[in-house]
Image: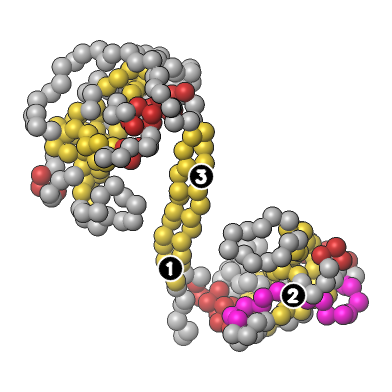
Amino acid sequence: MTEVLKAPLVVEFPFTRSLGPVQSAFLTGLRERTVLGVKTTDGKVMVPPVEYDPVTADELRDLVEVESTGTVTTWAWNPEPRRGQPLATPFAWVLVRLDGADTALLHALDAPGPDTVHTGMRVRVRWAAERTGAITDIACFETSDAEGAEAADAEPPAHDGQFGDAVTGIVARARLDYVYSPGRAQTAYINALADRRTVGERCPSCHKVYVPPRGACPTCGVATTDRVEVGPAGTVTTFCIVNVKAKNLDIELPYVYAHIALDGADLALHGRIAGIPYDQVRMGLRVEPVWTEGGRYPDHYRPTGEPDADYDTYKELV
């Protein structure tokens, strides 16, 4: 049996968002070594603050300043820190209810080992040396000198949320690292592409041929194991003209991206159309794959020179 493929995959994108007055005050406050919460309709103090009451949905604007010390309410040990996490050495993820707050803040606790962490322990904020107005301005939590001492039950002082040069927006760089396996069906499909062949799978019930194969028929729900070679030529069923340049994609604009129904397939796959002016690409255009030297998949598709396909032959695949 052919070994199923697998490879590391990284999905990464920057997410930019503007901040309302509450989040702006909270992050700007962290830059100034000040932790702010917001008072809810029933008088509770939420840290981190939110803009709307989670119970009544009322808009919240009453900011209060809480202490930088607090109590661990629960925790979990992280023996192998990953890229981008607060600490490079093993640490504990903790929920900390800061003194003056009624909710807990999730962050890292710098501790020598899991045997030194317990619910109810007293901790304090360790501020980052350089602060920019982000949650990472709290570098982590550390054990408080006042271990075991509980803070007085005092009303946290109101705060107007005003700071100079307020933070008004943030960029969160989302990233997901994982190992991806295409599975049995698509492993066979990818290996066949490396040999310049396109192989799909036929459903034993409805007899449709799926390219790329999925391992099971999405209509009948039964396994597809009968492999069928299709193409190489096909028909453009629909297309779009791309006018926006993608990062790290060196293709001259504009270009055409199309759905292509390969001969013998009952599902259209997508590919770039070249070898013809973009404004001459049309539904029904007959195309064939073009391979680059050493390429493991078609670089693009080009016209075959055949007459256009009749609409009735591909209308079910549009």
Which one is closest to the eye, mark 1 or mark 3?
3
Q: State the extent of the magenta-drawn residues as a range.
A: 295-309
How far apart are the two marked residues, 2 and 3, measured between alpha carbons?
Answer: 34 Å
Residue 80 place in picture, x, y as percent: 24, 57
Mark 1, residue position: 8
Comes first in the chain, label 2 or label 3: 3
157 inside magenta stretch = no
Residue density around tag 3, few if under 14, some if 14–19, many if 20 or more, within 10 Å: few
- What amino acid is labelled 2 in the image? Tyr
Q: What is the residue that sits farthest to the front in this orientation?
A: 164
Which is more N-terminal, label 1 or label 2?
Answer: 1
Q: Are marks 1 and 3 in contact (CB under 8 Å)?
A: no
Assess whether mark 3 and mark 2 are in contact (beta carbons under 8 angstroms): no
Magenta segment, principal secondary structure? loop
Vertical side of 117 occupied by 152: above or below: above
Corner quadrant of residue 134: top left
Quadrant of image for the C terminus: bottom right
Q: Position of residue 30 (x, y in %)?
A: 33, 31
